[in-house]
Image (tube, helix red, strand yellow):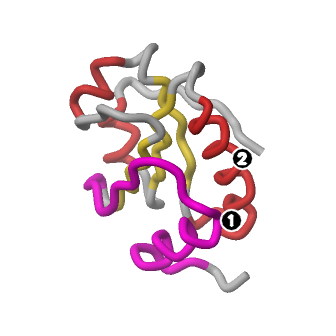
């Protein structure tokens, strides 16, 4: 289940996190973004607390999207120790997303 948190800035959130953060850059009108949201819902239970999931609406936060070079949605960026370590543009099947995450993060065995 998702929960909302408030941060002073996007940078504070990614720099201050003890766990890697997967940021889903999306737009509400984007059909593929809605499909990716379902993929993330399938992947989250297998990841557990090893990775935090964050959604950023590119229309509400265009400055954040521009800073990270988001030109197409959906785009996922995995941040680890405050730095981007992987970037995924477009859709992935849940298994492919898990493989990408496992390559960067020590995930629990499902």
Give the position of the C terminus as an image quadrant: bottom right
Q: What residue is pinned by disc 1?
A: 48
Q: Where is residue 23 in the image (x, y as percent from the top left)?
A: 46, 44
The picture places residue 20, in percent across and down from the top left corner, at 44, 60
The residue that appears at 39% across and 18% down in the rendered structure is: 61
Image quarter in which the N terminus is found: top right
Cβ atoms at labels 1 and 2 below 8 Å apart: no
Instruction: Point out the stretch of residues depicted in magenta.
Output: 82-107
Measured as percent of width and height from the top left, residue 11 is found at: 30, 36
Q: Is residue 56 left or right of residue 82?
A: right
Closest to the observer: 12 or 66? 66
Which numbered disc flags the more N-terminal residue, 1 or 2?
2
Q: Residue 14 carries which label?
A: none
Which residue is nearer to you in this view: 5 or 37? Answer: 37
Distance, label 1 to label 2, CA atoms, is 16 Å
Q: Considering the numbered disc 1 on the image, is that residue within a helix, a strand or a loop?
A: helix
**72 is higher (above) or lower (below) than 45:** above
Residue lying at the far bottom in this picture: please name it.
109
Crowd rating for badge 1 (residues with CA inside 10 Å; few <14, some 14–19, many 20+): few
* Label at residue 38: 2
């Amino acid at each position: 289940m998702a929960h909302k948190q408030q941060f002073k800035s996007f940078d504070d959130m990614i720099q201050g996190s003890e766990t890697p953060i997967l940021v889903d850059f999306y737009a509400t009108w984007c059909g593929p973004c809605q499909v990716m949201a379902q993929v993330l819902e399938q992947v989250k239970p297998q990841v557990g607390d090893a990775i935090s999931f964050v959604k950023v609406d590119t229309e509400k936060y265009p400055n954040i999207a521009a800073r990270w070079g988001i030109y197409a949605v959906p785009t996922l960026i995995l941040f680890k120790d405050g730095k981007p370590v992987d970037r995924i543009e477009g859709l992935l099947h849940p298994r492919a997303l898990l493989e990408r995450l496992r390559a960067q993060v020590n995930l629990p065995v499902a």
